[in-house]
Structures are given as structure tokens and as C-alpha cells.
Amino acid sequence: MISVMSLLLVIALSMLVIKIGSIALLMTGLSEEVAKFQALSAFSGTGFTTTEAESILKVPIRRRIISVLIRLGSVGVVTSISTLLLSFLGAGSATTERLLVLGLGVVVLLILAKNKTFNRLLNPVIERLLSRYTALDLRDYVSLLHLQEDYRIAEIDIREHNWLANQTIQDLNLTDEGVLVLGVKRAGEEYLGVPPTDLRLRPRDLLVLYGRKKRLKELATRGGGNKEAHQEAKDQNKKDVEGQRAQLERMNAAEED
């Protein structure tokens, strides 16, 4: 029976490692769904070759997290198999009893893993420990920028939208549309973060933007010289800003009361 409990402990530790890995990836800016999948993939050694996996390997912090998960996963799989063999080797008539204990233990672990209350208590603890005891510069950029809600970060290829070429960032006047220019990627050159307003865009540039999902989608499909679309976007952004100001005034009034 001790061997069965040891196996359950190995399974519990494996699930905890995957949980820690997914939270670490989540804190580097990945969405929750992608972080969970990639952590499980790395730990189990399945090695899915996807665009998401390739993008993770390009980021040093995420690459380190994946490397640790792969190493721990290789040890965990071997340990689980050996412990499983020892659990039922020579068990005889006690095999059924051990199977029941093992099955019940696995069910309990799965229930805990999916329990929202348990995760609400566990996740903040793991985040604090990662921030305190690791050298990783971890930030939950998804929550920070509200990327799971109405806001998105998008790239626009200037080659596919030639009307953007040979214009300065100031000429585009995207701020009035509620869209921020985070940076410009230039072929063969370094990334230009928070570029100056007088930067002139080139045909091979990638424009990195932050704004509402609907606005970014419309901007990516907008044709050149479409002044009506630009004016409509400005008017909509003005309404949004006025709505935000009204909300802030109501919040301030409530605090004063």
C-alpha cells in the first residue's frame, strides 16, 4: 500500500509542476489556454510542433521555463512507471484493493485540479513564490493589458496595406482613433519601441498596434484614402472617451459620498 501512496504522491507532484509551469508561462504574457497546453506538452514530452510553440522558443524567459518542464517531465515519467510496477508487483489478492485506492486517489486529485476555489487559493501563492524566489521577470501582460477582454495587440504588414507606406506615424493620427503605436519592426533591423511621431513607415515594416479588437480589425482592412472611415473611428473614440470620463466622475462621486 505504501507503493500506491508513493505513486499518488508522484502524480500529485507532477500535476503541481505542470500547474507551476502554466502559471509561469501565463505571467510572461501567454493566454491561459495556451499556457496550460504548452506546459502539459513540455512536461509530457509530446513535443507538439505548432506556431505557438515556435513563438515560445523565441522568448528566452519562456524557453527557460519549457526547458525546466522538459527535464522534470523526463524524471517524472520514469519515476511514475517504476513506482507503478512496484505497486502491483507481487500484490497477489491485494491487487484489487490497490487499484481501488489508486483510482480513488486519482479522482480526488483531478477534482482538486479542476476546483475553482482550490485554484483561486493556490494560484496567488504560486505567483508570489515565482516572483520572490526566481530571477524571471514575470508579468501577467494578458491581465495587465486586458487582452482577454475587448483589447488586443495586432501587427499590420505594410506590404499588404500600401496606403500606410511612406507616411509618418503623426500623419496616420491613430491616437485619435483610440489606437496606440507600440512599435515598428523593420526587416534586418532592431525593433523600434515607442517610435517617434516623425518616423516614416516603409513598405516592409510591421506596425505593432494596441487598441480595441473591432477597431484594429477595421484598420487592417481599411483601404487607402478612406477619410470617412478615419472620421468615423475618431467619432467613436470620442464617444468612448466621454463614456470613460462619465464613469470616472460617477466613481469619484461615489467615493466622496
Image: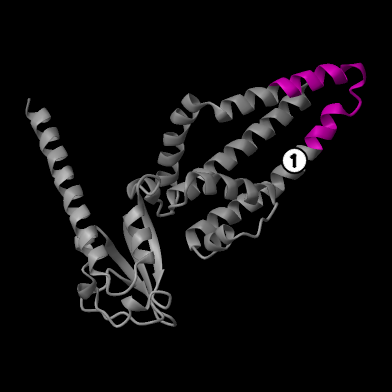
Q: How many marks?
A: 1
**For residue 102, above or below residue 212:** above
Closer to the camera in the image, 136 or 232 = 232
Task: Examine the rendering and report whether any part of residue 143 can be seen.
Answer: yes
Name the residue rendered at 46%, 35% in the picture. Answer: 123
Q: Is residue 86 magenta?
A: yes
The quarter in which the N terminus is drawn is top right
Q: Amino acid at mark 1?
A: Thr
> Along the horizontal axis of the image, is 253 left or right of 171?
left
> Along the horizontal axis of the image, is 31 left or right of 108?
left
- Residue 201 lies in quadrant: bottom left
| Position of residue 32 measured from the top left corner of the image (x, y, whole percent) | 49, 44
Closer to the camera in the image, 80 or 107 = 107
The quarter in which the C terminus is drawn is top left
Q: Secondary structure at mark 1?
A: helix
Name the residue rendered at 62%, 45% in the picture. Answer: 40
**Magenta region, residue range:** 82-104
Name the residue rendered at 63%, 51% in the picture. Answer: 42
- Residue 166 lies in quadrant: bottom left
| Position of residue 205 measured from the top left corner of the image (x, y, whole percent) | 38, 77
Q: Neighbour class for label 1 at 10 Å: few (<14), some, many (≥20)?
A: some
| Position of residue 16 measured from the top left corner of the image (x, y, whole percent) | 58, 37
Q: Is residue 226 magenta?
A: no
Q: Look at mark 1 in the image and give the residue it sits on.
A: 79
Name the residue rendered at 64%, 49% in the picture. Answer: 41
Magenta portion: prevailing SS class: helix
- Residue 181 lies in quadrant: bottom left
